[in-house]
Image (spheres, rainbow, N blue to C red):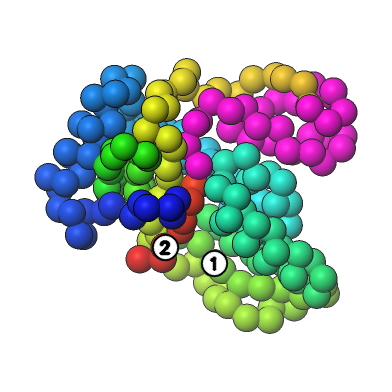
Amino acid sequence: MLPGSWAPNVDSDGVDGKIAGVAAIRAHDPAFNENAFLAEFQRLFFAVLEAWTALKPALSQGVMASLIWEEQKAQVAAYAAKGWHNVLSQVAFTSAVVAGALSDSAFDTVTVRVNANSADYDVDGAGAVIRGDTQPWDWTEDWIFQRPSTAVTGQPGTITSQSCPNCGASVNVDITSICPYCDAAVISGKFGWLLTRIDRV
């Protein structure tokens, strides 16, 4: 979490707390819309999972706060050094709801409770399963997003063509993409929120 903030959720704050939090965000950002936010979240969710399973941390750099991204980058490097990678096969995005929200003098914070289904296991360089569960199972996580409380909602993110900042190639970008020519991250910048924490529920 960003300094001086905490993760709101319905378990501790109740539904009324969540509704009040959304209203507080909308008070300074009338364009904030839960459904539009969740649509953007679903695309970001798969980008972050791909960054992890494909060992491409650059893919999530523009949508994660620096501390959590550095942790993911270090974990990816450790896996790559061993020749391992994590497999989340048959990933099914079941549902996502805004489970908590607040706005104070420093930050807007939104907790998204996501339900998904997948297998989750590690394999070595030869493809042998090292640990984990090869059978799909249901899991739930809270993904916490934050931004400065002075920020406002931009235009909804869409797949657009823009130039790679590294090599100049044209890249189709949703929230985040990897340039197919130089492997640099290309970020649309339209989401405006950073992922600061993930909690398994």
Q: Relative to 29, is 131 above or below?
A: below
Residue that badge 1 annotates: 119
| Image quarter hosting the C terminus | bottom left
The reply, left or right, for residue 10 in relation to residue 125 is left
Are the two marked residues, 1 and 2, in contact with CB atoms closer than 8 angstroms?
no
Q: Nearer the viewer, residue 1 or 36?
A: 1
Q: Say few, some or many: other residues with alpha carbon within 10 Å of mark 2 (under 14 / 14 to 19 / 20 or more).
A: few
Residue appearing at x 73%, y 38% in the figure: 185
- The residue type indicated by label 1 comes to Ala
Is residue 167 one of those drawn in magenta?
yes
Residue 17 in view in this figure: yes
Q: Helix, strand, or loop for circle 1?
A: strand
The residue at 43%/45% (across/down) is 145
Q: Earlier in the sequence, mark 1 or mark 2?
A: 1
Q: What is the span of residues highlighted in magenta in the rendered image?
A: 165-194
Q: Quadrant of the N terminus?
A: bottom left
Percent of width and height locating residue 49: 59, 53
Write down the residue under mark 2.
199
Instruction: Please state if 41 lies on the left or on the right of 105 as rendered.
Output: right
| Residue 75 locus on image (x, y percent) | 68, 66
Q: Secondary structure at mark 2?
A: strand
Nearer to us: label 1 or label 2: 2
Q: Amino acid at mark 2?
A: Asp
Q: Nearer the viewer, residue 94 or 83?
A: 83
The mark found on residue 87 in the picture is none
Residue 54 appears in the rendering: no
Q: Nearer the viewer, residue 94 or 182?
A: 182
Gap in angstroms between the C-alphas marked 1 and 2: 18 Å
Q: Is residue 106 above or below residue 154?
A: below
Residue nearer the viewer, 54 or 142: 142
Determine crowd level at label 1: few under 14, some 14-19, many 20+ residues with C-alpha closer than 10 A.
some
